[in-house]
Amino acid sequence: MADPVLLEHPADGVALLRINRPEARNALNLEVRKHLARHLTELGENEATRAVVLTGNQKSFAAGADIKEMADAGTIEMYQRGVHKLWRTIASCPKPVIAAVNGFALGGGCELAMTCDIIIAGETAKFGQPEVKIGIIPGGGATQRLTRAVGKYKAMRYILGGDPFNAREAFEMGLASEVVPDAEVEQRAIALAQQIAELPPLAIQLAKEAVLAGMEAPLSSALALEAKSAQMLFSSQDQKEGMRAFIEKRKPKFTGR
Protein backbone atom coordinates (compact mmCIF):
# COMPACT_ATOMS: atom_id res chain seq x y z
CA MET A 1 0.00 0.00 0.00
CA ALA A 2 1.43 3.38 -1.01
CA ASP A 3 2.43 5.88 1.65
CA PRO A 4 -0.35 8.51 1.77
CA VAL A 5 2.21 11.28 2.27
CA LEU A 6 5.54 11.20 0.44
CA LEU A 7 8.63 12.97 1.76
CA GLU A 8 11.07 14.38 -0.81
CA HIS A 9 14.17 16.57 -0.58
CA PRO A 10 14.24 18.65 -3.78
CA ALA A 11 16.97 21.07 -2.62
CA ASP A 12 19.39 21.70 0.24
CA GLY A 13 17.49 22.65 3.35
CA VAL A 14 14.11 22.07 1.66
CA ALA A 15 11.68 19.24 2.38
CA LEU A 16 8.64 18.55 0.22
CA LEU A 17 5.57 16.71 1.52
CA ARG A 18 3.31 15.33 -1.19
CA ILE A 19 -0.21 14.10 -0.38
CA ASN A 20 -0.51 10.83 -2.27
CA ARG A 21 -4.16 9.73 -2.58
CA PRO A 22 -4.83 10.43 -6.27
CA GLU A 23 -7.67 7.90 -6.37
CA ALA A 24 -9.58 10.07 -3.85
CA ARG A 25 -8.45 13.49 -5.14
CA ASN A 26 -6.13 13.63 -2.10
CA ALA A 27 -9.04 13.69 0.35
CA LEU A 28 -7.81 14.09 3.90
CA ASN A 29 -8.61 10.90 5.78
CA LEU A 30 -7.34 10.26 9.29
CA GLU A 31 -4.26 8.41 8.02
CA VAL A 32 -3.17 11.36 5.85
CA ARG A 33 -3.62 13.78 8.74
CA LYS A 34 -1.57 11.57 11.06
CA HIS A 35 1.22 11.28 8.51
CA LEU A 36 1.26 15.04 7.93
CA ALA A 37 1.39 15.70 11.68
CA ARG A 38 4.24 13.22 12.15
CA HIS A 39 6.28 14.52 9.22
CA LEU A 40 5.86 18.18 10.18
CA THR A 41 6.78 17.45 13.79
CA GLU A 42 9.95 15.65 12.71
CA LEU A 43 10.87 18.28 10.12
CA GLY A 44 10.29 21.02 12.67
CA GLU A 45 12.91 19.40 14.91
CA ASN A 46 15.39 18.68 12.11
CA GLU A 47 18.11 21.34 11.93
CA ALA A 48 18.94 20.42 8.34
CA THR A 49 15.42 21.36 7.23
CA ARG A 50 14.92 25.10 6.90
CA ALA A 51 11.72 25.27 4.84
CA VAL A 52 8.92 22.90 3.86
CA VAL A 53 6.77 22.72 0.74
CA LEU A 54 3.37 21.02 1.05
CA THR A 55 1.65 19.93 -2.15
CA GLY A 56 -0.59 17.38 -3.85
CA ASN A 57 -0.76 16.76 -7.59
CA GLN A 58 -1.81 18.65 -10.70
CA LYS A 59 -5.50 17.84 -10.20
CA SER A 60 -5.87 18.27 -6.45
CA PHE A 61 -3.98 19.80 -3.57
CA ALA A 62 -6.60 18.22 -1.31
CA ALA A 63 -10.24 18.06 -2.31
CA GLY A 64 -11.46 18.11 1.30
CA ALA A 65 -12.08 15.70 4.13
CA ASP A 66 -12.84 12.07 3.36
CA ILE A 67 -16.64 12.19 3.64
CA LYS A 68 -17.01 8.41 3.47
CA GLU A 69 -14.88 8.10 6.59
CA MET A 70 -17.08 10.40 8.68
CA ALA A 71 -20.60 10.14 7.25
CA ASP A 72 -21.90 7.71 9.88
CA ALA A 73 -19.74 8.85 12.82
CA GLY A 74 -21.21 10.17 16.05
CA THR A 75 -20.08 13.02 18.28
CA ILE A 76 -18.03 10.88 20.68
CA GLU A 77 -16.32 9.02 17.85
CA MET A 78 -15.40 12.29 16.12
CA TYR A 79 -13.96 13.62 19.37
CA GLN A 80 -11.98 10.46 20.05
CA ARG A 81 -10.41 10.56 16.58
CA GLY A 82 -8.53 13.64 17.76
CA VAL A 83 -8.53 15.39 14.40
CA HIS A 84 -8.59 18.77 16.18
CA LYS A 85 -5.29 17.85 17.87
CA LEU A 86 -3.75 16.84 14.54
CA TRP A 87 -4.74 20.20 13.03
CA ARG A 88 -2.94 21.97 15.91
CA THR A 89 0.18 19.85 15.35
CA ILE A 90 0.18 20.54 11.61
CA ALA A 91 -0.25 24.28 12.14
CA SER A 92 2.46 24.53 14.80
CA CYS A 93 5.48 23.55 12.67
CA PRO A 94 8.16 26.14 13.54
CA LYS A 95 9.70 26.05 10.06
CA PRO A 96 8.24 28.11 7.20
CA VAL A 97 5.71 26.01 5.29
CA ILE A 98 4.72 26.86 1.72
CA ALA A 99 1.55 25.42 0.18
CA ALA A 100 1.89 24.67 -3.54
CA VAL A 101 -1.74 24.48 -4.68
CA ASN A 102 -2.90 23.01 -7.97
CA GLY A 103 -6.45 21.94 -8.68
CA PHE A 104 -8.89 21.59 -5.79
CA ALA A 105 -8.24 22.97 -2.31
CA LEU A 106 -11.73 22.61 -0.85
CA GLY A 107 -13.00 22.20 2.69
CA GLY A 108 -10.22 20.60 4.72
CA GLY A 109 -7.88 21.11 1.76
CA CYS A 110 -8.40 24.86 1.88
CA GLU A 111 -7.97 24.75 5.65
CA LEU A 112 -4.74 22.77 5.24
CA ALA A 113 -3.40 25.43 2.87
CA MET A 114 -4.31 28.08 5.44
CA THR A 115 -2.19 26.38 8.11
CA CYS A 116 0.79 27.19 5.89
CA ASP A 117 2.68 30.48 5.90
CA ILE A 118 2.69 31.15 2.16
CA ILE A 119 0.31 29.92 -0.55
CA ILE A 120 1.47 29.60 -4.16
CA ALA A 121 -1.58 28.93 -6.34
CA GLY A 122 -1.87 27.70 -9.89
CA GLU A 123 -4.01 29.76 -12.25
CA THR A 124 -6.79 27.16 -12.37
CA ALA A 125 -6.75 26.27 -8.65
CA LYS A 126 -10.10 26.25 -6.87
CA PHE A 127 -10.52 27.14 -3.21
CA GLY A 128 -13.60 26.99 -1.03
CA GLN A 129 -15.38 25.95 2.17
CA PRO A 130 -18.44 23.99 1.01
CA GLU A 131 -19.14 22.27 4.34
CA VAL A 132 -22.58 23.86 4.81
CA LYS A 133 -23.72 22.02 1.68
CA ILE A 134 -23.38 18.69 3.50
CA GLY A 135 -24.86 19.82 6.81
CA ILE A 136 -21.78 20.80 8.81
CA ILE A 137 -19.43 23.77 9.18
CA PRO A 138 -15.66 24.01 8.72
CA GLY A 139 -13.88 22.21 11.54
CA GLY A 140 -10.23 22.68 10.65
CA GLY A 141 -9.90 26.39 11.29
CA ALA A 142 -11.58 28.13 8.35
CA THR A 143 -14.08 30.13 10.40
CA GLN A 144 -11.08 31.77 12.07
CA ARG A 145 -8.18 31.63 9.60
CA LEU A 146 -10.18 32.65 6.53
CA THR A 147 -11.75 35.52 8.46
CA ARG A 148 -8.34 36.73 9.63
CA ALA A 149 -6.94 36.44 6.10
CA VAL A 150 -9.69 38.11 4.08
CA GLY A 151 -11.97 39.88 6.57
CA LYS A 152 -15.42 39.14 7.97
CA TYR A 153 -17.54 39.97 4.96
CA LYS A 154 -15.58 38.00 2.36
CA ALA A 155 -15.23 35.07 4.74
CA MET A 156 -18.96 35.05 5.51
CA ARG A 157 -19.72 35.12 1.79
CA TYR A 158 -17.86 31.87 1.16
CA ILE A 159 -18.41 30.06 4.47
CA LEU A 160 -22.18 30.67 4.49
CA GLY A 161 -22.65 30.30 0.72
CA GLY A 162 -20.35 27.34 0.27
CA ASP A 163 -19.31 28.51 -3.21
CA PRO A 164 -15.80 27.95 -4.56
CA PHE A 165 -13.51 30.79 -5.62
CA ASN A 166 -10.63 30.79 -8.05
CA ALA A 167 -6.93 31.52 -7.60
CA ARG A 168 -7.17 35.11 -8.83
CA GLU A 169 -9.99 35.82 -6.38
CA ALA A 170 -7.94 34.21 -3.61
CA PHE A 171 -5.01 36.47 -4.46
CA GLU A 172 -7.14 39.61 -4.60
CA MET A 173 -8.68 38.75 -1.21
CA GLY A 174 -5.27 38.24 0.35
CA LEU A 175 -5.46 34.47 0.74
CA ALA A 176 -2.99 33.44 -1.97
CA SER A 177 0.53 34.89 -1.88
CA GLU A 178 1.20 34.41 -5.60
CA VAL A 179 -0.60 33.05 -8.66
CA VAL A 180 1.54 31.36 -11.31
CA PRO A 181 0.88 29.09 -14.31
CA ASP A 182 -0.23 25.62 -13.21
CA ALA A 183 2.90 23.93 -14.55
CA GLU A 184 5.14 26.25 -12.50
CA VAL A 185 3.50 25.98 -9.08
CA GLU A 186 5.72 23.33 -7.52
CA GLN A 187 8.99 24.73 -8.88
CA ARG A 188 8.06 28.25 -7.78
CA ALA A 189 7.30 26.98 -4.28
CA ILE A 190 10.60 25.09 -4.16
CA ALA A 191 12.51 28.13 -5.41
CA LEU A 192 10.95 30.30 -2.71
CA ALA A 193 11.70 27.63 -0.10
CA GLN A 194 15.33 27.60 -1.29
CA GLN A 195 15.49 31.38 -0.96
CA ILE A 196 14.22 31.15 2.62
CA ALA A 197 16.50 28.19 3.41
CA GLU A 198 19.55 30.28 2.57
CA LEU A 199 18.61 32.93 5.12
CA PRO A 200 19.46 32.81 8.86
CA PRO A 201 17.12 30.20 10.36
CA LEU A 202 16.88 31.85 13.79
CA ALA A 203 15.73 35.11 12.25
CA ILE A 204 13.25 33.25 10.03
CA GLN A 205 11.82 31.30 12.96
CA LEU A 206 11.48 34.35 15.20
CA ALA A 207 9.89 36.36 12.38
CA LYS A 208 7.30 33.61 11.90
CA GLU A 209 6.63 33.46 15.65
CA ALA A 210 6.22 37.23 15.86
CA VAL A 211 3.72 37.33 12.98
CA LEU A 212 1.61 34.43 14.26
CA ALA A 213 1.63 35.43 17.93
CA GLY A 214 1.05 39.07 17.04
CA MET A 215 -2.13 38.23 15.12
CA GLU A 216 -3.70 37.06 18.38
CA ALA A 217 -2.40 39.85 20.63
CA PRO A 218 -3.10 43.55 21.14
CA LEU A 219 -0.90 45.79 19.00
CA SER A 220 1.14 46.97 22.00
CA SER A 221 1.92 43.40 23.06
CA ALA A 222 2.72 42.36 19.49
CA LEU A 223 5.12 45.27 19.04
CA ALA A 224 6.83 44.40 22.35
CA LEU A 225 7.29 40.81 21.16
CA GLU A 226 8.74 42.04 17.87
CA ALA A 227 11.20 44.35 19.65
CA LYS A 228 12.37 41.64 22.06
CA SER A 229 12.80 39.15 19.24
CA ALA A 230 14.81 41.63 17.17
CA GLN A 231 17.01 42.46 20.16
CA MET A 232 17.56 38.79 21.01
CA LEU A 233 18.99 38.12 17.54
CA PHE A 234 21.92 40.39 18.31
CA SER A 235 23.30 37.54 20.41
CA SER A 236 23.38 35.22 17.41
CA GLN A 237 26.41 34.39 15.28
CA ASP A 238 24.26 34.79 12.19
CA GLN A 239 23.55 38.42 13.02
CA LYS A 240 27.28 39.15 13.28
CA GLU A 241 28.00 37.23 10.07
CA GLY A 242 25.16 38.87 8.17
CA MET A 243 26.16 42.40 9.07
CA ARG A 244 29.87 41.77 8.51
CA ALA A 245 29.11 40.27 5.10
CA PHE A 246 26.98 43.30 4.24
CA ILE A 247 29.79 45.68 5.20
CA GLU A 248 32.41 43.57 3.39
CA LYS A 249 30.16 43.21 0.31
CA ARG A 250 30.22 39.41 0.26
CA LYS A 251 27.67 36.63 0.51
CA PRO A 252 27.03 35.60 4.14
CA LYS A 253 27.31 32.03 5.41
CA PHE A 254 24.55 31.38 7.94
CA THR A 255 24.83 28.45 10.36
CA GLY A 256 21.74 28.83 12.53
CA ARG A 257 23.80 29.75 15.58
Image (tube, rainbow, N blue to C red):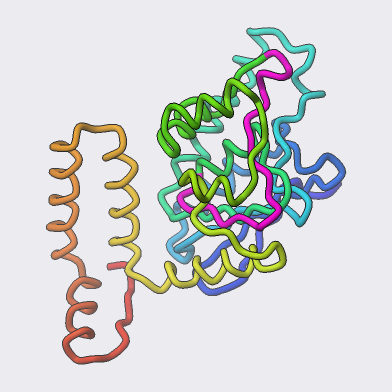
Residue 51 shows in this picture: yes
What are the residue bounds of the magenta stretch? 116-135
Q: Return the residue nearer the eye: 92 or 55.
A: 55
Q: Is residue 211 left or right of residue 12?
A: left
Residue at image point 79% right, 12% down? 72
Q: Return the residue nearer the eye: 113 or 235.
A: 113
Q: Position of residue 190 (x, y in %)?
A: 57, 67
Q: Is residue 118 left or right of residue 103?
A: left
Q: Position of residue 11 (x, y in %)?
A: 57, 73
Residue at image point 27% right, 68% down? 257
Q: How many marks?
A: 0
Q: Is residue 137 left or right of residue 238?
A: right
Residue 34 shows in this picture: no
Q: Return the residue nearer the eye: 77 or 195.
A: 195
User: From what the image shows, is residue 9 above or below residue 244?
Assistant: above
Q: Return the residue nearer the eye: 27 or 219.
A: 219
Q: Position of residue 209 (x, y in %)?
A: 31, 47
The part of the image, by quadrant, that contains residue 256 is bottom left
User: From what the image shows, is residue 20 above or below residue 128?
Assistant: below
The part of the image, by quadrant, that contains residue 106 is top right
Residue at image point 47% right, 66% down? 48
Magenta span includes 132: yes
Magenta span includes 175: no
User: From what the image shows, is residue 162 above or below residue 215?
Assistant: above
Q: Is residue 67 left or right of residue 84?
A: right
